[in-house]
Amino acid sequence: MAFVLIGFMGAGKSTVAGRLARLRGRSALDSDVLLAERFGHSVAREFELHGEESFRAAEEELVCRLLGDVSARDVVALGGGSVLSARVRDALDGHVTALLEVAPDTAWERVQAAEDGSERPPARDREAFGALYAERRGLYEEVADAALLWAESASGDYPVFVGDGLLDGKDGGGDRLVTIWPLAPIASRPYGVTDTNVARLYGERLSALGDPDAPPEQIAIEPGELHKTLASAELVWRELARRGMTRADHVVALGGGVVGDLAGFCAATYQRGVPVVHVPTTLVAQVDSAYGGKTGVDLPGAKNYVGAYHQPAGVLVDPGMLATLAPAELAAGWVEVLKTALIAGGTLWERVSAADGCYVDKRTILDCARTKLAIVSADERDGGRRQVLNLGHTVGHAIEAVTGYARYRHGEAVGLGLLAALRLSGAEDLRARVRELLLARDLPITLDSANVDIEEIVAATARDKKRLGADGVPFVLLSTPGEPQIGCEVADDELRAAVRELAS
Ligand code: NAD
Protein backbone atom coordinates (compact mmCIF):
# COMPACT_ATOMS: atom_id res chain seq x y z
CA MET A 1 0.00 0.00 0.00
CA ALA A 2 1.59 3.29 -1.13
CA PHE A 3 0.66 6.86 -0.31
CA VAL A 4 -0.57 8.71 -3.41
CA LEU A 5 -1.03 12.46 -3.78
CA ILE A 6 -3.57 13.80 -6.23
CA GLY A 7 -4.77 17.33 -6.88
CA PHE A 8 -4.86 20.23 -9.25
CA MET A 9 -1.80 21.49 -11.09
CA GLY A 10 0.04 24.04 -8.94
CA ALA A 11 -1.03 22.36 -5.67
CA GLY A 12 2.62 21.58 -4.91
CA LYS A 13 2.29 17.77 -5.11
CA SER A 14 5.92 17.16 -6.13
CA THR A 15 7.35 19.29 -3.33
CA VAL A 16 5.04 17.83 -0.69
CA ALA A 17 5.68 14.25 -1.89
CA GLY A 18 9.42 14.84 -1.45
CA ARG A 19 8.99 16.23 2.07
CA LEU A 20 6.60 13.46 3.16
CA ALA A 21 8.93 10.80 1.79
CA ARG A 22 11.84 12.30 3.75
CA LEU A 23 9.79 12.27 6.98
CA ARG A 24 9.07 8.57 6.50
CA GLY A 25 12.48 7.61 5.18
CA ARG A 26 10.96 6.46 1.87
CA SER A 27 11.23 7.44 -1.82
CA ALA A 28 9.10 9.95 -3.69
CA LEU A 29 7.99 9.22 -7.24
CA ASP A 30 6.44 11.81 -9.53
CA SER A 31 4.47 10.72 -12.58
CA ASP A 32 5.10 14.00 -14.46
CA VAL A 33 8.87 13.69 -13.91
CA LEU A 34 8.83 10.05 -15.06
CA LEU A 35 6.79 10.99 -18.13
CA ALA A 36 9.14 13.84 -19.03
CA GLU A 37 12.05 11.38 -18.77
CA ARG A 38 10.29 8.96 -21.05
CA PHE A 39 9.36 11.66 -23.62
CA GLY A 40 12.81 13.22 -23.48
CA HIS A 41 11.15 16.63 -23.09
CA SER A 42 8.70 18.43 -20.83
CA VAL A 43 5.05 17.49 -20.42
CA ALA A 44 4.08 20.90 -21.87
CA ARG A 45 6.15 20.18 -24.97
CA GLU A 46 4.49 16.76 -25.33
CA PHE A 47 1.06 18.43 -25.24
CA GLU A 48 2.25 20.74 -28.00
CA LEU A 49 3.79 18.02 -30.17
CA HIS A 50 1.19 15.26 -29.94
CA GLY A 51 -1.87 16.75 -28.26
CA GLU A 52 -3.71 15.93 -25.04
CA GLU A 53 -5.19 12.57 -26.10
CA SER A 54 -1.81 11.05 -26.85
CA PHE A 55 -0.41 12.49 -23.61
CA ARG A 56 -3.29 11.05 -21.54
CA ALA A 57 -2.80 7.59 -23.05
CA ALA A 58 0.92 7.62 -22.18
CA GLU A 59 0.13 8.96 -18.70
CA GLU A 60 -2.51 6.26 -18.06
CA GLU A 61 -0.12 3.51 -19.06
CA LEU A 62 2.75 4.83 -16.94
CA VAL A 63 0.64 5.59 -13.85
CA CYS A 64 -1.08 2.17 -13.87
CA ARG A 65 2.28 0.44 -14.11
CA LEU A 66 3.72 2.67 -11.39
CA LEU A 67 0.84 1.96 -9.01
CA GLY A 68 1.22 -1.76 -9.68
CA ASP A 69 4.97 -1.80 -8.97
CA VAL A 70 5.36 0.75 -6.23
CA SER A 71 6.83 -0.34 -2.87
CA ALA A 72 4.67 -0.21 0.20
CA ARG A 73 4.73 3.19 1.93
CA ASP A 74 6.48 5.01 -0.93
CA VAL A 75 5.03 8.41 -1.77
CA VAL A 76 3.70 8.94 -5.29
CA ALA A 77 2.64 12.29 -6.80
CA LEU A 78 0.27 12.03 -9.78
CA GLY A 79 -0.23 14.64 -12.51
CA GLY A 80 -3.36 16.77 -12.12
CA GLY A 81 -5.36 15.07 -14.90
CA SER A 82 -4.35 11.46 -14.28
CA VAL A 83 -7.44 10.55 -12.23
CA LEU A 84 -9.64 11.39 -15.24
CA SER A 85 -8.81 7.84 -16.37
CA ALA A 86 -11.09 5.10 -14.97
CA ARG A 87 -8.15 2.65 -15.20
CA VAL A 88 -6.04 4.92 -13.00
CA ARG A 89 -8.92 5.27 -10.51
CA ASP A 90 -9.18 1.46 -10.33
CA ALA A 91 -5.43 1.18 -9.85
CA LEU A 92 -5.68 3.54 -6.87
CA ASP A 93 -7.72 0.93 -4.99
CA GLY A 94 -5.53 -0.61 -2.34
CA HIS A 95 -3.45 2.56 -1.92
CA VAL A 96 -4.08 5.57 0.30
CA THR A 97 -4.96 8.63 -1.75
CA ALA A 98 -4.85 12.20 -0.43
CA LEU A 99 -6.09 15.32 -2.21
CA LEU A 100 -3.57 18.13 -1.75
CA GLU A 101 -5.66 21.24 -1.19
CA VAL A 102 -4.86 24.49 -2.98
CA ALA A 103 -6.85 27.66 -3.61
CA PRO A 104 -7.37 28.35 -7.35
CA ASP A 105 -5.55 31.72 -7.16
CA THR A 106 -2.50 30.17 -5.50
CA ALA A 107 -2.47 27.34 -8.06
CA TRP A 108 -2.65 29.85 -10.92
CA GLU A 109 0.21 31.96 -9.52
CA ARG A 110 2.40 28.91 -8.99
CA VAL A 111 1.76 27.52 -12.44
CA GLN A 112 2.56 30.89 -14.03
CA ALA A 113 5.81 31.06 -12.06
CA ALA A 114 6.88 27.50 -12.96
CA GLU A 115 9.48 27.03 -15.68
CA ASP A 116 7.22 25.56 -18.33
CA GLY A 117 3.96 25.80 -16.35
CA SER A 118 2.31 28.57 -18.32
CA GLU A 119 3.00 26.67 -21.53
CA ARG A 120 0.57 23.92 -20.51
CA PRO A 121 -2.69 24.43 -22.43
CA PRO A 122 -4.94 24.55 -19.33
CA ALA A 123 -2.68 27.24 -17.82
CA ARG A 124 -2.93 29.77 -20.63
CA ASP A 125 -6.19 31.38 -19.69
CA ARG A 126 -7.21 32.33 -16.10
CA GLU A 127 -10.91 31.82 -16.69
CA ALA A 128 -10.50 28.39 -18.31
CA PHE A 129 -8.11 27.47 -15.48
CA GLY A 130 -10.77 28.34 -12.88
CA ALA A 131 -13.45 26.40 -14.76
CA LEU A 132 -11.24 23.32 -14.98
CA TYR A 133 -10.47 23.58 -11.25
CA ALA A 134 -14.18 23.64 -10.41
CA GLU A 135 -14.88 20.76 -12.81
CA ARG A 136 -12.19 18.48 -11.38
CA ARG A 137 -12.76 19.26 -7.71
CA GLY A 138 -15.68 16.81 -7.31
CA LEU A 139 -13.77 13.98 -8.95
CA TYR A 140 -10.71 14.53 -6.74
CA GLU A 141 -12.91 14.50 -3.63
CA GLU A 142 -14.58 11.27 -4.75
CA VAL A 143 -11.27 9.52 -5.31
CA ALA A 144 -9.41 10.75 -2.20
CA ASP A 145 -9.41 9.01 1.19
CA ALA A 146 -8.43 12.30 2.84
CA ALA A 147 -7.84 15.96 2.14
CA LEU A 148 -4.32 17.23 2.81
CA LEU A 149 -3.36 20.75 3.84
CA TRP A 150 0.35 21.49 3.94
CA ALA A 151 1.00 23.66 7.01
CA GLU A 152 3.96 26.03 6.82
CA SER A 153 5.66 27.97 9.58
CA ALA A 154 9.08 29.37 10.36
CA SER A 155 9.98 26.42 12.58
CA GLY A 156 8.73 23.66 10.31
CA ASP A 157 6.17 22.32 7.86
CA TYR A 158 3.76 19.47 8.50
CA PRO A 159 0.84 17.65 6.91
CA VAL A 160 -2.76 17.99 8.09
CA PHE A 161 -5.00 15.13 6.93
CA VAL A 162 -8.78 15.36 7.18
CA GLY A 163 -10.84 12.30 6.26
CA ASP A 164 -13.77 10.26 7.55
CA GLY A 165 -12.70 6.91 8.95
CA LEU A 166 -8.97 7.75 8.78
CA LEU A 167 -8.41 6.01 12.09
CA ASP A 168 -10.86 3.14 11.58
CA GLY A 169 -9.24 -0.23 12.03
CA LYS A 170 -11.72 -1.98 9.72
CA ASP A 171 -11.17 -3.10 6.09
CA GLY A 172 -7.41 -2.71 6.01
CA GLY A 173 -7.73 0.46 8.09
CA GLY A 174 -4.68 -0.45 10.16
CA ASP A 175 -2.49 -0.55 7.08
CA ARG A 176 -4.07 2.68 5.86
CA LEU A 177 -3.20 4.38 9.14
CA VAL A 178 0.42 3.24 9.02
CA THR A 179 0.66 4.41 5.40
CA ILE A 180 -0.73 7.88 6.10
CA TRP A 181 1.07 8.34 9.46
CA PRO A 182 3.47 11.28 9.09
CA LEU A 183 6.41 9.49 10.77
CA ALA A 184 7.65 5.95 10.22
CA PRO A 185 6.27 4.14 13.30
CA ILE A 186 9.03 1.51 13.18
CA ALA A 187 11.92 3.98 13.33
CA SER A 188 10.09 6.32 15.72
CA ARG A 189 7.84 4.59 18.26
CA PRO A 190 4.56 6.36 19.06
CA TYR A 191 3.70 7.10 22.72
CA GLY A 192 0.03 7.99 23.08
CA VAL A 193 -1.10 10.64 25.55
CA THR A 194 -4.86 10.80 26.00
CA ASP A 195 -7.55 11.16 28.67
CA THR A 196 -9.54 8.33 30.20
CA ASN A 197 -12.74 9.13 28.22
CA VAL A 198 -10.97 9.14 24.88
CA ALA A 199 -8.84 6.10 25.81
CA ARG A 200 -12.03 4.12 26.37
CA LEU A 201 -13.57 5.20 23.06
CA TYR A 202 -10.59 5.41 20.72
CA GLY A 203 -7.48 4.18 22.53
CA GLU A 204 -7.23 1.02 20.48
CA ARG A 205 -7.29 2.95 17.18
CA LEU A 206 -3.56 3.54 17.55
CA SER A 207 -2.79 -0.15 17.96
CA ALA A 208 -2.02 -0.51 14.22
CA LEU A 209 1.03 1.66 14.82
CA GLY A 210 2.66 -1.00 17.00
CA ASP A 211 3.37 -4.72 16.64
CA PRO A 212 0.37 -7.07 16.90
CA ASP A 213 1.68 -8.31 20.27
CA ALA A 214 3.06 -4.96 21.43
CA PRO A 215 0.61 -2.09 20.90
CA PRO A 216 1.99 1.44 21.39
CA GLU A 217 2.36 2.68 24.95
CA GLN A 218 -0.48 4.93 26.07
CA ILE A 219 -0.80 7.27 29.07
CA ALA A 220 -4.28 8.48 30.07
CA ILE A 221 -4.78 11.52 32.31
CA GLU A 222 -8.05 12.46 34.00
CA PRO A 223 -10.32 14.38 31.58
CA GLY A 224 -11.10 18.09 31.66
CA GLU A 225 -9.53 21.51 32.05
CA LEU A 226 -8.91 20.94 35.77
CA HIS A 227 -6.23 18.46 34.74
CA LYS A 228 -4.37 20.73 32.32
CA THR A 229 -1.78 21.28 35.02
CA LEU A 230 1.90 20.92 35.79
CA ALA A 231 1.00 17.94 37.98
CA SER A 232 -0.46 16.13 34.94
CA ALA A 233 2.57 17.12 32.88
CA GLU A 234 4.87 15.65 35.52
CA LEU A 235 2.87 12.45 35.52
CA VAL A 236 3.23 12.20 31.72
CA TRP A 237 6.98 13.01 31.76
CA ARG A 238 7.60 10.37 34.44
CA GLU A 239 5.58 7.75 32.57
CA LEU A 240 7.35 8.48 29.28
CA ALA A 241 10.69 8.03 31.04
CA ARG A 242 9.56 4.90 32.90
CA ARG A 243 8.33 3.34 29.66
CA GLY A 244 11.61 4.00 27.91
CA MET A 245 10.72 6.74 25.44
CA THR A 246 13.81 8.07 23.63
CA ARG A 247 14.47 11.14 21.50
CA ALA A 248 13.96 9.01 18.39
CA ASP A 249 10.33 8.34 19.37
CA HIS A 250 7.29 10.61 19.20
CA VAL A 251 4.24 11.58 21.25
CA VAL A 252 0.70 11.16 19.91
CA ALA A 253 -1.82 13.61 21.37
CA LEU A 254 -5.12 11.71 21.13
CA GLY A 255 -7.94 13.83 22.50
CA GLY A 256 -9.44 17.29 22.79
CA GLY A 257 -7.74 20.63 23.36
CA VAL A 258 -6.76 19.78 26.93
CA VAL A 259 -4.88 16.66 25.87
CA GLY A 260 -3.43 18.44 22.82
CA ASP A 261 -2.07 21.38 24.87
CA LEU A 262 -0.73 19.13 27.63
CA ALA A 263 0.75 16.40 25.41
CA GLY A 264 2.24 19.05 23.10
CA PHE A 265 3.86 20.72 26.12
CA CYS A 266 5.22 17.38 27.36
CA ALA A 267 6.60 16.70 23.85
CA ALA A 268 8.17 20.17 23.70
CA THR A 269 10.00 19.60 26.97
CA TYR A 270 10.62 15.84 27.29
CA GLN A 271 14.35 15.36 26.68
CA ARG A 272 14.31 18.98 25.40
CA GLY A 273 11.85 18.19 22.63
CA VAL A 274 10.46 15.21 20.75
CA PRO A 275 7.98 15.28 17.82
CA VAL A 276 4.23 15.22 18.42
CA VAL A 277 1.47 14.04 16.10
CA HIS A 278 -1.99 15.36 16.96
CA VAL A 279 -5.13 13.27 16.58
CA PRO A 280 -7.81 15.76 17.68
CA THR A 281 -11.11 14.26 18.84
CA THR A 282 -13.22 17.30 19.84
CA LEU A 283 -14.56 20.09 17.66
CA VAL A 284 -12.36 22.66 19.46
CA ALA A 285 -9.33 20.55 18.66
CA GLN A 286 -10.31 19.68 15.07
CA VAL A 287 -10.98 23.28 14.05
CA ASP A 288 -8.45 25.10 16.20
CA SER A 289 -6.20 23.82 18.97
CA ALA A 290 -4.42 21.00 17.07
CA TYR A 291 -2.84 23.51 14.65
CA GLY A 292 -0.26 26.19 15.21
CA GLY A 293 1.96 24.71 17.90
CA LYS A 294 0.77 26.54 21.03
CA THR A 295 1.11 24.13 23.94
CA GLY A 296 0.88 24.59 27.68
CA VAL A 297 -0.82 24.17 31.02
CA ASP A 298 -2.83 26.43 33.32
CA LEU A 299 -1.82 27.91 36.66
CA PRO A 300 -4.58 28.12 39.29
CA GLY A 301 -5.41 31.77 38.57
CA ALA A 302 -4.08 32.15 35.04
CA LYS A 303 -4.96 30.22 31.93
CA ASN A 304 -2.17 28.80 29.69
CA TYR A 305 0.48 30.62 31.74
CA VAL A 306 3.21 28.02 31.29
CA GLY A 307 3.95 26.59 27.87
CA ALA A 308 6.00 26.46 24.71
CA TYR A 309 5.65 26.80 20.98
CA HIS A 310 6.08 23.36 19.45
CA GLN A 311 4.75 22.73 15.95
CA PRO A 312 3.31 19.26 15.31
CA ALA A 313 4.96 16.69 13.05
CA GLY A 314 1.48 16.11 11.62
CA VAL A 315 -2.25 16.29 12.38
CA LEU A 316 -4.78 13.56 11.54
CA VAL A 317 -8.44 14.59 11.74
CA ASP A 318 -11.29 12.10 11.54
CA PRO A 319 -14.54 14.12 11.71
CA GLY A 320 -16.39 10.84 12.41
CA MET A 321 -14.95 10.90 15.94
CA LEU A 322 -17.19 13.87 16.74
CA ALA A 323 -20.20 11.53 16.70
CA THR A 324 -19.49 10.43 20.29
CA LEU A 325 -19.02 13.96 21.63
CA ALA A 326 -21.64 15.16 24.14
CA PRO A 327 -23.97 17.79 22.58
CA ALA A 328 -22.78 20.43 25.08
CA GLU A 329 -19.14 19.80 24.09
CA LEU A 330 -20.05 20.04 20.41
CA ALA A 331 -21.83 23.35 21.06
CA ALA A 332 -18.83 24.70 23.00
CA GLY A 333 -16.56 23.65 20.14
CA TRP A 334 -18.81 25.40 17.67
CA VAL A 335 -17.88 28.73 19.29
CA GLU A 336 -14.31 28.29 17.93
CA VAL A 337 -15.87 27.77 14.49
CA LEU A 338 -17.85 30.98 14.99
CA LYS A 339 -14.70 32.84 16.12
CA THR A 340 -12.75 31.61 13.09
CA ALA A 341 -15.60 32.60 10.76
CA LEU A 342 -15.70 36.10 12.30
CA ILE A 343 -11.96 36.45 11.72
CA ALA A 344 -12.06 35.04 8.18
CA GLY A 345 -15.25 36.80 7.00
CA GLY A 346 -16.32 36.03 3.42
CA THR A 347 -17.88 32.70 2.51
CA LEU A 348 -16.88 31.00 5.79
CA TRP A 349 -18.76 33.63 7.82
CA GLU A 350 -21.77 33.41 5.46
CA ARG A 351 -21.89 29.62 5.73
CA VAL A 352 -21.35 29.43 9.50
CA SER A 353 -23.77 32.25 10.37
CA ALA A 354 -26.46 30.77 8.13
CA ALA A 355 -26.15 27.17 9.37
CA ASP A 356 -28.50 25.50 11.82
CA GLY A 357 -27.13 23.69 14.86
CA CYS A 358 -23.55 22.76 15.59
CA TYR A 359 -23.01 20.19 12.89
CA VAL A 360 -19.76 20.94 11.11
CA ASP A 361 -18.81 19.20 7.89
CA LYS A 362 -15.39 18.30 6.55
CA ARG A 363 -15.32 21.45 4.39
CA THR A 364 -15.84 23.74 7.39
CA ILE A 365 -13.16 21.90 9.38
CA LEU A 366 -10.78 22.37 6.45
CA ASP A 367 -11.69 26.05 6.06
CA CYS A 368 -11.15 26.71 9.78
CA ALA A 369 -7.81 24.86 9.71
CA ARG A 370 -6.76 26.74 6.57
CA THR A 371 -7.67 30.10 8.13
CA LYS A 372 -5.69 29.38 11.27
CA LEU A 373 -2.69 27.95 9.42
CA ALA A 374 -2.47 30.98 7.13
CA ILE A 375 -2.40 33.29 10.16
CA VAL A 376 0.18 31.17 12.00
CA SER A 377 2.43 30.89 8.96
CA ALA A 378 2.67 34.69 8.87
CA ASP A 379 3.35 35.04 12.62
CA GLU A 380 4.14 31.84 14.45
CA ARG A 381 4.99 33.40 17.81
CA ASP A 382 2.16 35.84 18.39
CA GLY A 383 4.25 38.90 17.59
CA GLY A 384 1.47 40.53 15.61
CA ARG A 385 -1.05 39.05 13.19
CA ARG A 386 -1.52 35.81 15.19
CA GLN A 387 -3.11 37.83 17.97
CA VAL A 388 -6.32 37.99 15.87
CA LEU A 389 -6.90 34.40 17.00
CA ASN A 390 -7.41 35.77 20.53
CA LEU A 391 -10.71 37.36 19.48
CA GLY A 392 -13.07 36.72 22.40
CA HIS A 393 -10.33 34.98 24.39
CA THR A 394 -9.11 37.86 26.56
CA VAL A 395 -12.34 38.06 28.55
CA GLY A 396 -13.03 34.33 27.88
CA HIS A 397 -9.80 33.22 29.60
CA ALA A 398 -10.51 35.55 32.53
CA ILE A 399 -13.96 33.99 32.96
CA GLU A 400 -12.45 30.50 32.93
CA ALA A 401 -9.75 31.40 35.46
CA VAL A 402 -12.09 33.25 37.85
CA THR A 403 -14.61 30.42 37.82
CA GLY A 404 -11.91 27.85 38.60
CA TYR A 405 -12.00 26.19 35.15
CA ALA A 406 -15.11 24.36 36.32
CA ARG A 407 -18.18 26.53 35.69
CA TYR A 408 -17.82 27.13 31.92
CA ARG A 409 -16.36 25.06 29.11
CA HIS A 410 -13.59 26.82 27.18
CA GLY A 411 -15.88 27.45 24.18
CA GLU A 412 -18.72 28.72 26.40
CA ALA A 413 -16.38 31.24 28.03
CA VAL A 414 -15.08 32.31 24.60
CA GLY A 415 -18.69 32.86 23.45
CA LEU A 416 -19.18 35.29 26.33
CA GLY A 417 -15.80 36.82 25.52
CA LEU A 418 -16.93 37.37 21.91
CA LEU A 419 -19.99 39.27 23.12
CA ALA A 420 -17.76 41.48 25.27
CA ALA A 421 -15.29 42.04 22.42
CA LEU A 422 -18.10 43.01 20.01
CA ARG A 423 -19.52 45.43 22.59
CA LEU A 424 -16.07 47.03 22.92
CA SER A 425 -15.90 47.17 19.11
CA GLY A 426 -19.16 49.11 18.99
CA ALA A 427 -20.50 46.45 16.58
CA GLU A 428 -24.08 46.43 17.83
CA ASP A 429 -25.73 44.59 14.93
CA LEU A 430 -23.00 41.98 14.73
CA ARG A 431 -23.15 41.45 18.50
CA ALA A 432 -26.91 40.94 18.27
CA ARG A 433 -26.42 38.37 15.49
CA VAL A 434 -23.71 36.50 17.45
CA ARG A 435 -25.94 36.55 20.54
CA GLU A 436 -28.76 34.96 18.49
CA LEU A 437 -26.42 32.31 17.13
CA LEU A 438 -25.19 31.41 20.64
CA LEU A 439 -28.72 31.39 22.04
CA ALA A 440 -29.93 29.10 19.26
CA ARG A 441 -27.30 26.57 20.36
CA ASP A 442 -28.16 26.77 24.06
CA LEU A 443 -24.84 28.47 24.74
CA PRO A 444 -24.60 30.97 27.61
CA ILE A 445 -25.13 34.60 26.68
CA THR A 446 -25.02 35.93 30.23
CA LEU A 447 -22.75 35.37 33.19
CA ASP A 448 -24.08 33.63 36.24
CA SER A 449 -23.87 36.87 38.26
CA ALA A 450 -24.87 35.25 41.54
CA ASN A 451 -21.65 33.22 41.48
CA VAL A 452 -19.26 35.32 39.44
CA ASP A 453 -17.54 38.48 40.63
CA ILE A 454 -17.33 41.03 37.81
CA GLU A 455 -14.41 42.90 39.41
CA GLU A 456 -12.43 39.67 39.59
CA ILE A 457 -13.01 39.11 35.87
CA VAL A 458 -11.83 42.64 35.09
CA ALA A 459 -8.70 42.03 37.21
CA ALA A 460 -8.07 38.60 35.62
CA THR A 461 -8.44 40.13 32.17
CA ALA A 462 -5.62 42.49 33.02
CA ARG A 463 -3.50 39.51 34.09
CA ASP A 464 -4.13 37.77 30.80
CA LYS A 465 -0.84 36.89 29.23
CA LYS A 466 -1.70 38.90 26.11
CA ARG A 467 -1.24 42.07 28.17
CA LEU A 468 1.68 43.84 26.55
CA GLY A 469 1.82 47.31 28.03
CA ALA A 470 1.29 48.80 31.46
CA ASP A 471 -1.84 50.80 30.65
CA GLY A 472 -5.02 49.09 29.61
CA VAL A 473 -5.38 45.67 27.99
CA PRO A 474 -4.63 45.35 24.27
CA PHE A 475 -7.75 43.78 22.76
CA VAL A 476 -8.68 42.21 19.47
CA LEU A 477 -11.69 44.15 18.22
CA LEU A 478 -13.83 43.56 15.16
CA SER A 479 -16.57 45.66 13.67
CA THR A 480 -17.01 43.71 10.42
CA PRO A 481 -16.46 39.97 9.83
CA GLY A 482 -13.08 39.49 8.18
CA GLU A 483 -11.57 42.71 9.60
CA PRO A 484 -10.13 42.02 13.07
CA GLN A 485 -7.93 44.73 14.62
CA ILE A 486 -5.17 43.77 17.04
CA GLY A 487 -3.57 45.74 19.88
CA CYS A 488 -6.60 47.97 20.55
CA GLU A 489 -6.36 49.83 23.84
CA VAL A 490 -9.46 49.55 25.99
CA ALA A 491 -9.95 51.70 29.07
CA ASP A 492 -10.72 49.88 32.32
CA ASP A 493 -14.17 51.46 32.68
CA GLU A 494 -15.17 50.41 29.15
CA LEU A 495 -14.00 46.87 29.92
CA ARG A 496 -15.91 46.90 33.21
CA ALA A 497 -19.07 48.03 31.40
CA ALA A 498 -18.73 45.32 28.73
CA VAL A 499 -18.24 42.57 31.36
CA ARG A 500 -21.01 44.01 33.55
CA GLU A 501 -23.37 43.86 30.60
CA LEU A 502 -22.77 40.09 30.44
CA ALA A 503 -24.09 39.78 33.95
CA SER A 504 -27.37 41.52 33.23
P1 NAD B 1 -11.36 18.78 26.39
O1 NAD B 1 -10.08 18.37 25.80
O2 NAD B 1 -11.44 18.89 27.86
O3 NAD B 1 -12.50 17.80 25.88
C1 NAD B 1 -13.81 17.96 26.35
C2 NAD B 1 -14.39 16.64 26.87
O4 NAD B 1 -14.71 15.79 25.77
C3 NAD B 1 -13.46 15.85 27.77
O5 NAD B 1 -14.22 15.30 28.82
C4 NAD B 1 -12.97 14.71 26.86
O6 NAD B 1 -12.64 13.53 27.58
C5 NAD B 1 -14.16 14.48 25.97
N1 NAD B 1 -13.90 13.95 24.64
C6 NAD B 1 -12.87 14.26 23.82
N2 NAD B 1 -13.06 13.70 22.61
C7 NAD B 1 -14.22 13.01 22.69
C8 NAD B 1 -14.95 12.25 21.74
N3 NAD B 1 -14.57 12.14 20.45
N4 NAD B 1 -16.08 11.65 22.15
C9 NAD B 1 -16.52 11.80 23.44
N5 NAD B 1 -15.88 12.55 24.35
C10 NAD B 1 -14.74 13.14 23.98
O7 NAD B 1 -11.82 20.21 25.85
P2 NAD B 1 -11.73 20.94 24.43
O8 NAD B 1 -12.93 21.79 24.37
O9 NAD B 1 -11.46 19.99 23.32
O10 NAD B 1 -10.43 21.85 24.55
C11 NAD B 1 -10.38 22.97 25.39
C12 NAD B 1 -8.92 23.32 25.61
O11 NAD B 1 -8.31 23.66 24.37
C13 NAD B 1 -8.71 24.50 26.53
O12 NAD B 1 -7.75 24.18 27.50
C14 NAD B 1 -8.17 25.59 25.62
O13 NAD B 1 -7.30 26.46 26.27
C15 NAD B 1 -7.45 24.77 24.58
N6 NAD B 1 -7.25 25.47 23.30
C16 NAD B 1 -5.98 25.54 22.83
C17 NAD B 1 -5.74 26.17 21.62
C18 NAD B 1 -4.33 26.19 21.06
O14 NAD B 1 -4.09 26.86 20.07
N7 NAD B 1 -3.42 25.46 21.64
C19 NAD B 1 -6.78 26.74 20.90
C20 NAD B 1 -8.08 26.64 21.41
C21 NAD B 1 -8.30 25.99 22.61
Image: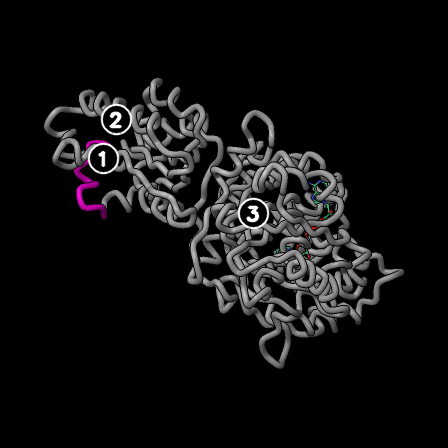
User: Which structural element holds mark 1?
Assistant: helix
**Quarter residue 475 falls in:** bottom right
Q: Residue furthest front?
A: 213
Mark closer to the observer (2, 3): 2
**Does the magenta portion include 119?**
yes
**Left or right: 323 as drawn, with respect to 314:** right
Work out which quarter of the rendered image holds the C terminus and state it.
bottom right
Q: Which of the labelled discs sits on residue 62, or is there none?
A: 2
Rendering coords of residue 342 (x, y %): 57, 50
**Does the magenta portion include 199?**
no
Q: Earlier in the sequence, mark 3 or mark 1?
A: 1
Pick the residue in front: 289 or 73: 73
Q: Residue furthest top?
A: 86
Rendered residue at 56%/57% (across/down): 479
Work out which quarter of the rendered image holds the N terminus and state it.
top left
Which residues, given as a range, are shown in magenta?
113-124
Q: Which of the labelled discs sits on residue 341, or is there none?
A: 3
Q: Earlier in the sequence, mark 2 or mark 3?
A: 2
| Residue pointed to by mark 1 | 34
Pick the residue in front: 499 or 293: 293
**Left or right: 325 as drawn, with respect to 349:** right
Rendering coords of residue 56 (x, y %): 23, 23
Task: Give the amino acid type for the residue marked by disc 3 in the picture.
Answer: Ala
Label tally = 3
How far is disc 2 from disc 3 in space, using C-alphas? 43 Å
Pick the residue in front: 30 or 434: 30
Above or below, comparing residue 502 to residue 109 in the picture? below
Task: Give the amino acid type for the residue marked by disc 1 in the picture.
Answer: Leu
Pick the residue in front: 133 or 425: 133
**Left or right: 385 as drawn, with respect to 219:** left
